[in-house]
C-alpha cells in the first residue's frame, strides 16, 4: 500500500500534469458542487489541495463579497501558476498545513481520495476543526462494502474510494450528500454544517 509521504512526492510532480489540464474540466452548468457551494453564506474560505486554484478563481469571479481566501497544494509549479493570477496560494501538504485562523468554509475537490485509509479520519477531523460554518468534500465514493471501508483502485497514483458516509458518522458529523455533476453517479459531494 502506498503511504502518505510517497504520495506527497508523487503529487509534487504529477500536480504539474494536472495543472496543464486546467481550466476546470467541468463547465459551471454541469458542476453541481460549485453551484451548491456558491449558495452558501461565507466571507472567507480555504481550499485544500488547490493545484493552481481553479476552483478558487471561479469562486472569486462569481462571489464578489469574499473578504479573504487561501489555497494550498504540494505542487510548487501549480501554486506559482495560481499566484501569477493574483490568487493567495501557498505550498504545503495536508499533513503539514497549519491554520493561523478559522474559516467560514473549508473545501476539497478530488483530494481526499488520495489519502491513505490510515490517515483519512485524522485529516478530515483536522480540517473540520478549522471551519466555523461549512466543510465540503467533492470526491468519489465507495458504494459497496469491502470490509476495509474503502475500495483500492490505483496503486501507482494511490487512489482510494473511501466510504465517506461511514467516516462522517464515526466522526459524529451531521451531513448531506449530493450528486456532484450531471450524469455522473460515481462522484458526490458532502456538506457538513457546523455551528449553524
Image (cartoon, rainbow, N blue to C red):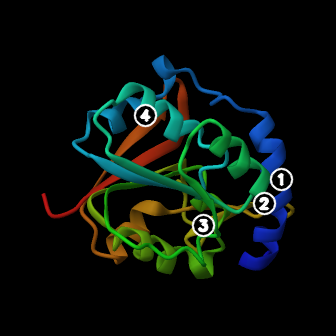
User: In this figure, which residue is indicated by the disc labeled 1?
Assistant: 14
Q: Residue furthest top?
A: 29
Q: Residue furthest left?
A: 196
**Tags 2 and 1 touching, CB below 8 Å:** yes
Is there any visible trace of residue 3 in the rendered image? Answer: no
User: In this figure, which residue is indicated by the disc labeled 2?
Assistant: 11
- Marked residue nearer the N-terminal end (3 or 2): 2
**Tags 4 and 1 touching, CB below 8 Å:** no
**Residue located 15% across and 64% down the image:** 195
User: In this figure, which residue is indicated by the disc labeled 4?
Assistant: 60
List x then y, in percent, for residue 32. 42, 30
Callout 1 secondary element:
helix
Q: CA distance from mark 2 to mark 4?
A: 25 Å
Q: CA distance from mark 3 to mark 2?
A: 21 Å
**Residue located 38% across and 29% down the image:** 35
Which of 2 and 162 lies nearest the eye of the viewer?
A: 2
Answer above or below: position of 10 versus 20.
below
List x then y, in percent, for residue 132. 24, 63
The 10 Å Cα crowd at callout 4, few under 14, some 14 to 19, many 20 or more, is some
**Tags 3 and 2 touching, CB below 8 Å:** no
Callout 2 secondary element:
helix
User: In this figure, which residue is indicated by the disc labeled 3?
Assistant: 150
Amino acid at each position: 500500500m502506498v503511504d502518505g509521504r510517497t504520495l506527497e512526492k508523487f503529487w509534487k510532480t504529477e500536480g504539474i500534469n494536472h495543472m496543464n489540464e486546467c481550466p476546470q474540466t467541468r463547465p459551471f452548468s454541469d458542476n453541481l458542487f460549485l453551484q451548491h457551494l456558491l449558495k452558501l453564506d461565507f466571507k472567507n474560505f480555504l481550499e485544500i489541495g488547490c493545484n493552481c486554484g481553479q476552483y478558487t478563481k471561479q469562486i472569486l469571479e462569481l462571489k464578489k463579497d469574499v473578504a479573504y481566501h487561501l489555497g494550498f497544494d504540494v505542487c510548487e509549479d501549480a501554486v506559482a501558476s495560481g499566484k501569477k493570477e493574483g490568487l493567495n496560494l501557498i505550498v504545503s501538504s495536508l499533513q503539514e498545513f497549519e491554520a493561523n485562523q478559522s474559516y467560514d468554509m473549508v473545501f476539497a475537490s478530488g483530494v481526499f481520495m488520495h489519502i491513505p485509509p490510515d490517515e483519512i479520519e485524522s485529516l478530515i477531523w483536522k480540517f473540520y476543526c478549522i471551519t466555523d460554518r461549512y466543510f465540503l468534500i467533492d470526491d468519489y465514493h465507495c458504494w459497496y462494502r469491502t470490509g476495509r471501508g474503502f475500495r483500492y483502485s490505483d496503486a501507482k497514483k494511490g487512489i482510494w474510494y473511501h466510504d465517506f458516509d461511514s467516516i462522517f458518522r464515526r466522526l459524529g458529523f451531521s451531513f448531506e450528500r449530493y450528486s456532484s455533476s450531471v450524469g455522473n453517479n460515481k462522484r458526490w459531494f458532502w456538506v457538513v454544517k457546523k455551528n449553524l
